[in-house]
Structure formats: structure tokens, C-alpha cells
């Protein structure tokens, strides 16, 4: 199946099984805005919980806050968002389609990188065990040529972006002969800067209204509360403040389902440290965050780091954790060493002293900040797309199964009476009454048992319990595992212990 087909399946499965709906669908939808359905909301909440447990509950020195979406407008001046939160946009005159100029160049580079990968995989097959990747990459004329090309493009590209040179950016797109994927033409407009913040108004009458912005990131709510939290929590550096919340960006191109939305959620953590220790903390948080992702078992090969060549105005080091989405490796999480940029800037703009007093050294200083920032919706897409699998079974039939990491699955247990009679539904309901205190449990009595298993597979429910006549006699049930499809007979208490063990957060988050 092509990646494009796979992605289409992901989108249609998300809708069909109540995970994600287009926002305002009955009014033909609102572009790049989505609603989470009954199962999507459970999955999303479980991801939040997994993040907050590992970030806050397991770290004595990291606390949680929930700041408002609406903030004083000067905050966005201080943070640099009013002046610098822009994306370069370009239009194709024939298709009238709008693109991000930087993304067009990045995709061109990705195509050349793919050519290198193809050469490598061909050579691997040819040379077998004798294949030496380093030697091949540095001597094969085609690969060397591609690498030089990438280096040249990257140099020109970085220079243009760093100096905001939009003319050179357009020239690069023309020189690379990049065509519009819709019209196939190279008929481009000039590149323009476009600010991504959504504006809104505060106030009852038009004359007295104040212009505000919907926050484009949650981080600033943490910075402006730095002293409040540090003082009231009597926190000592190093310490962190975590927050999950909505952010809004008027994205120019928003075509990849929940990967790029105009309203989305971020899970951010700002770690306040002593100046000079940022390198050490940067590498520690890179390791910790990757370990968090790997703990879910979606496959090591699906993650990679991408170091930023062009650093944002606030950073002295930055990288992304990229994930292998159905449309290729793309940013899932950012890790940024933000220096003292934000706190110093808020100190300047607010004229309030924002310093930390170190009781040990008896000195005051502006802390440096290490940030980890992950998009909750992107994390959802990563989990959902990697878990959706079409399997061929031994008898030749197929099943669609959502092998979501069990700890994140929306519903944990489905209780299924074998028949809709003989007291089996009543007994099933009694078992639910017992299980629902510990696990998100659902009941299903409609259709043949095989079809009910398939339905729960498609929803990602890890365990199905079948209640039959033997249950009436000896209190045992059949437990079926979603992934292996193995069925075992055991008592209800044994089932409870087994499921508790498999969903033990300690096992999942001990890394
Ligand atoms: P991109 O380069 O993809 O636009 P970014 O570098 O602007 O992303 P950050 O500002 O670092 O993103 O935001 C932190 C995280 O928030 C990202 O890693 C991503 O997971 C998430 N995120 C950013 N923009 C969006 C969006 N429009 N929709 C969904 N998630 C987003």
C-alpha cells in the first residue's frame, strides 16, 4: 500500500470509529480545525496523562500550571512573536495555491535525500555482508553528487532565511526548478512574510476595544508566571514548569490532517537552570524525551533527531524529534535551549525584576531555560497512524486492528456476553460494575462474537472478556488479547490481576 493510501485509511478510520471529525462538518467544515470524538477524546486524555505522569508526578522538581489563553498583548511583543512569528509564503499564479516557501525547499531536499537512500539500499543488496556504508557514501559518485547538491542548497537556504532575504528565497525556488504539485508550473509570485497569530478584541465597544492575540504557544504563560510559581512553591533551581493547553496559529498551508492545525494543543515544559549548564541539560532532556517516546514501543526506527541549522531568535541550540508519519519523517517534538531570552525580555518590557536568588551562592541571576515542546495532536497522529494495521490471518481472512500501546488505549476492556439470554447480559453488567472502578470498560452484546471482536480490534481495545454459560457455573471467563488473539480461560480475579499488571504505569514509565 502506498503511503498516500495508508494516510487516507488513517483519516477514514479515525472518522468511522469516532476518533476525529472535521470541525463544523454539517456546515461543510472549517479548514484545518478538527473535533475529537468519543474514542479520540479518551486516547488524547490518556496521552496527556502519560506525559504529565512522567513529567510532573515522577519529578519532584517539576510542577504543573494552567495559564489563560488570552494574555496581555505586550507579552507577544516581548516574546518576539509580533515581529518575528512569520512564515514566508509564495503563491503559484496558475493553480492559485499557496505554499510555505521554506517547506517547498525542504521537500526538494528531502527528495534528494530519498535518492541517496535508494542508492544505498540498491548497493546493500548488491554487496550483501561486505557492504560498508561509510565507504560507499563517501566514494559512490552519484551519492557524493547528491550530497554536494544538498550542502549547496542548504547553505543558500540558511543564508536567505537568516537574513530574511525573500528575494534570494524566491530565486532559490526558481533555480531549483521547483514546480507547483497542482498546476505543474513554475509561475511563482514573490515571497511574502505572513504573521501566524490570530488577532481578537477585548472590550464591549469597538472604540474602547483592545487588540489581543490568541496565544500561538503555551510557553509564554509559563515565563510570565515564573516568579509566582517559584516563590509560592519555594522552588530551587533547577526546576521545571509544565503545561498542557491550546495554542492557535493561522497556518498558511494546513493540509495534513491533524499534523498541522489552526487550533491545537501543546504539552510544554520549561526547565529553569543556572546559566552555563545549558549544554548538559540539553543533552539530558534529549535523552529523556526520546526514552519517553520509545517506552511506548512504536519502534525505535521511527524516531530520529534533526538538529536545527537555523536557530530561532531565542535559542543557542535546538533540535526536533522527528517521527516517521505516513507522509515521511516530520517534527513531532522540539527541544530548545532558550537561554535567558524570554525572562530577560519580559523583565525589560514589564519593568519588573525577574531574577532568581540563589541562597547557596548568595547571588541573583536570570535563569536559562531548557524547553521541551510536543504537539499533543501530532503525538495522537503518531500513535494512531503507527498502530493502524491490516493483518492477514492464518485462514486467509483479513482484520483491521488498532494496536495502540495498551496503556493509551481509549477503552481497556470490552465485556461481551456470548448470548443475549440465559442471564448472561445480567452477569456481564455485574462484572462491569466491578471493573469500571479500575478500567475504562465497555459493554457490547450486538452481533456474533467474531464480529464483536473485530469491532473492538478496530477500536484498539486491548482485552475482550467473553461471558458464557460456564461463567454462570464456575465464575471463569475467556480473555482475548487484541494483539496475539490468544484466548485464555481464567477467573475474574485472575483477569483483574493480569490486566493490572499489563497496564502498570511503573513498568511503562521506568526508563
Ligand atoms: P513546524 O516547523 O512543523 O511548523 P514549529 O517548529 O513551528 O513546527 P514549535 O513552535 O516548535 O513548532 O511547536 C512545538 C510543537 O508544537 C511542534 O513540535 C509540534 O508538535 C506542535 N505544533 C506546532 N504547530 C502545530 C500545528 N499547526 N498543528 C499541530 N501541532 C503543531
Image: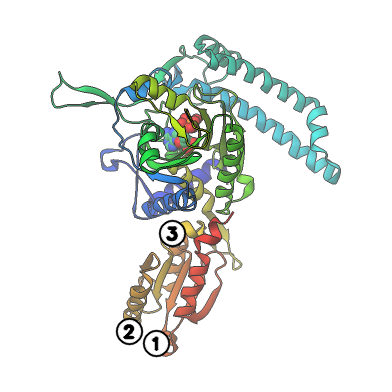
Tell me how far mark 3 sits from mark 1, CA to CA: 28 Å
Query: Where is residue 3 shown, x and y percent of the image?
Result: 56, 42
Which residue corresponds to mark 1?
A: 472
Q: Are marks 1 and 2 in contact (CB under 8 Å)?
A: yes
The reply to whether callout 3 and callout 1 are in contact (CB within 8 Å) is: no
| Earlier-in-chain disc, 3 versus 1 | 3
**Vertical comparison of 440 with 434: above or below:** above
Of residue 390 and residue 468, the one placed in the foreground of this image is 468
Q: Which residue is mark 3?
A: 459
- Name the image quarter holding residue 69: top left
For disc 2, the neighbor class at 10 Å (few under 14, some 14 to 19, many from 20) is few
What residue is disc 2 on? Answer: 423
SS for tag 2?
loop
Q: Could you tell me how far apart the alpha carbons at marks 1 and 2 are, in whole angstroms?
A: 8 Å
Q: Earlier in the sequence, mark 2 or mark 3?
A: 2
Residue in view at x 59 percent, y 40 percent: 286
Q: Residue at x 51, y 23 (%)?
A: 312
Residue 177's spot in the image, x, y percent? Answer: 59, 17
Q: Position of residue 501 (x, y in %)?
A: 52, 68
Image quadrant occupied by the C terminus: bottom right
Rounded to the nearest angstrom, the CA distance separating label 2 from label 3 is 27 Å
Which sits earlier in the primary sequence, circle 1 or circle 2? 2
Amino acid at each position: 500500500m502506498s503511503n498516500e493510501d495508508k494516510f487516507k485509511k488513517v483519516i477514514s478510520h479515525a472518522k468511522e470509529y469516532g476518533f476525529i471529525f472535521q470541525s463544523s462538518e454539517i456546515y461543510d467544515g472549517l479548514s484545518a480545525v478538527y473535533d475529537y470524538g468519543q474514542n479520540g477524546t479518551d486516547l488524547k486524555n490518556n496521552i496527556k496523562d502519560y506525559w504529565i505522569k512522567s513529567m510532573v508526578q515522577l519529578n519532584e522538581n517539576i510542577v504543573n500550571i494552567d495559564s489563560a489563553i488570552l494574555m496581555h498583548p505586550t507579552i507577544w511583543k516581548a516574546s518576539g512573536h509580533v515581529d518575528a512569528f512569520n512564515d514566508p509564503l509564495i503563491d503559484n499564479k496558475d493553480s492559485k495555491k499557496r505554499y510555505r516557501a521554506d517547506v517547498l525547499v525542504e521537500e526538494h531536499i528531502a527528495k534528494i535525500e530519498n535518492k541517496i537512500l535508494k542508492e544505498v539500499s540498491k548497493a546493500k543488496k548488491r554487496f550483501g555482508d561486505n557492504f560498508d556504508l561509510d565507504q560507499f557514501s563517501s566514494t559512490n559518485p552519484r551519492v557524493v553528487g547528491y550530497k554536494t547538491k544538498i550542502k549547496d542548497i542548504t547553505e543558500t537556504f540558511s543564508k536567505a532565511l537568516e537574513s530574511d532575504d525573500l528575494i534570494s528565497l524566491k530565486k532559490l525556488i526558481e533555480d531549483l526548478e521547483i514546480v507547483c504539485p497542482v498546476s505543474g508550473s513554475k509561475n511563482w509570485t514573490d515571497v511574502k512574510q505572513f504573521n501566524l497569530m490570530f488577532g481578537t478584541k477585548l472590550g464591549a465597544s469597538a472604540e474602547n476595544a483592545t487588540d489581543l492575540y490568541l496565544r500561538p504557544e503555551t510557553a509564554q504563560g509559563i515565563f510570565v508566571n515564573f516568579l509566582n510559581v517559584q516563590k509560592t512553591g519555594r522552588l530551587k533551581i533547577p526546576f521545571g514548569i509544565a503545561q498542557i493547553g491550546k495554542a492557535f496559529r493561522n497556518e498558511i498551508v494546513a493540509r495534513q490532517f491533524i499534523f498541522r492545525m489552526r487550533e491545537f494543543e501543546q504539552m510544554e515544559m520549561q526547565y529553569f537552570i543556572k546559566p552555563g549548564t545549558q549544554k548538559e541539560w540539553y543533552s539530558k532532556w534529549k535523552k529523556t524525551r526520546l526514552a519517553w517516546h520509545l517506552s511506548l514501543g512504536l519502534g525505535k526506527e521511527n524516531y530520529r533527531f534533526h538538529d536545527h541549522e537555523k536557530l530561532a531568535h531565542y535559542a543557542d541550540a535546538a533540535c526536533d524529534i522527528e517521527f516517521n508519519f505516513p507522509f515521511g519523517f516530520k517534527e513531532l517534538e522540539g527541544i530548545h535551549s532558550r537561554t535567558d531570552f524570554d525572562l530577560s525580555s519580559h523583565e525589560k518590557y514589564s519593568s519588573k525584576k525577574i531574577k532568581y536568588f540563589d541562597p547557596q551562592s548568595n547571588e541573583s541571576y536570570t535563569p536559562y531555560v531548557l524547553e521541551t515542546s510536543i504537539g499533543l495532536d501530532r503525538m495522537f497522529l503518531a500513535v494512531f497512524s503507527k498502530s493502524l494495521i491490516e493483518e492477514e490471518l492464518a485462514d486467509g481472512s483479513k482484520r483491521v486492528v488498532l494496536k495502540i500501546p495498551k496503556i493509551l488505549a481509549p477503552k481497556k476492556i470490552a465485556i461481551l456476553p456470548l448470548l443475549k439470554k440465559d442471564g448472561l447480559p445480567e452477569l456481564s453488567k455485574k462484572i462491569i460494575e466491578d471493573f469500571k472502578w479500575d478500567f475504562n470498560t465497555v459493554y457490547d452484546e450486538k452481533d456474533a462474537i467474531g464480529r464483536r471482536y473485530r469491532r473492538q480490534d478496530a477500536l484498539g481495545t486491548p482485552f475482550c472478556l467473553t461471558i458464557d454459560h460456564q461463567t454462570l457455573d464456575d465464575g471463569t471467563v475467556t480473555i482475548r488479547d487484541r494483539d496475539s488473539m490468544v484466548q485464555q480461560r481464567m477467573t475474574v480475579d485472575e483477569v483483574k490481576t493480569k490486566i493490572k499488571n499489563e497496564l502498570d504505569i511503573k513498568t511503562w514509565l521506568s526508563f
